[in-house]
Amino acid sequence: MTLRKGIVLDFGGVLTTALLPAALAFEQREGLPAGALLTSLYLDPEGVRRTQELERGTLTQTEWNEAAGRSLGVPHDNLMGRIFADLLPEHSVIEAAAAARRAGIKVGVLSNSVGRSPWDLYHGYGLESLYDAVVVSEDHGLRKPEPEIFRLMLDMLDLPAEECVFVDDTESYLPPAAGLGFATVHAVRPDRTIAELEALLGIPLAAGG
């Protein structure tokens, strides 16, 4: 097996704690039925369209908040921030990424945006200083799983796909990356993610490893 020289990490659900528990906690706080938020975002065609426009940067977070608030029947003020209020840094993966960089591995972050104002998902994570390349979808008018956004990241890392690993908690984003030549890791549990990266890179990444 050829050892890989680069890692491309999703942000939400990889460098942060899992998204689903945060969404369920939001529903509970707002008195919504379990699954109401996910249905609105991922099953309702209009909700899906709005979220994809947000990711491309053609819809602002404020506009998304207003429309999603109407759809859910909840106040729209800082809705995105309220939805993800329980997200925390996933320190074990962040530390593994830092260990990879110390070992000479290039590490990029590739994220579908949720907008940056009034609430900034990325605030406090030091993306520009701690990673070799950062691609946030709204900055480029692209979104995962479009192949062009993966190619953009490869250009920024100056590596071919065959030398990189792509990690995402959304399983449907993995096949397009694999089609370009990436090795892929479905991020389900941080310890499993780190173990799979160690095998693909051939270096220890876990704390104490």
Image (cartoon, rainbow, N blue to C red):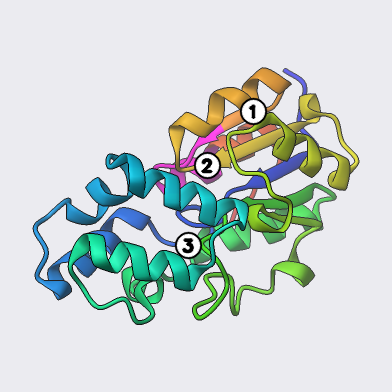
Q: Are marks 1 and 2 in contact (CB under 8 Å)?
A: yes
Q: Position of residue 193 (x, y in %)?
A: 50, 42
For numbered disc 1, what is the local secondary structure? helix
Residue bounds of the magenta highlight: 185-195
For numbered disc 2, what is the local secondary structure? strand
> Relative to 129, is 95 on the left or the right?
left
Q: According to the image, label 2 marks what residue?
A: 168
Q: Amino acid at mark 2?
A: Asp
Q: Is residue 190 one of those drawn in magenta?
A: yes
Q: Amino acid at mark 1?
A: Ala
Image position of 41 with respect to 71: above or below: above
Q: Residue at x 74, y 34 (%)?
A: 148
Number of other residues with Cα within 10 Å of mark 3, as a class: few under 14, some 14 to 19, many 20 or more: many
Q: Position of residue 131 (x, y in %)?
A: 76, 61
Q: Nearer the viewer, mark 1 or mark 3?
A: 1
* 20 and 52: which is toward the camera: 52
Q: According to the image, label 3 marks what residue?
A: 16
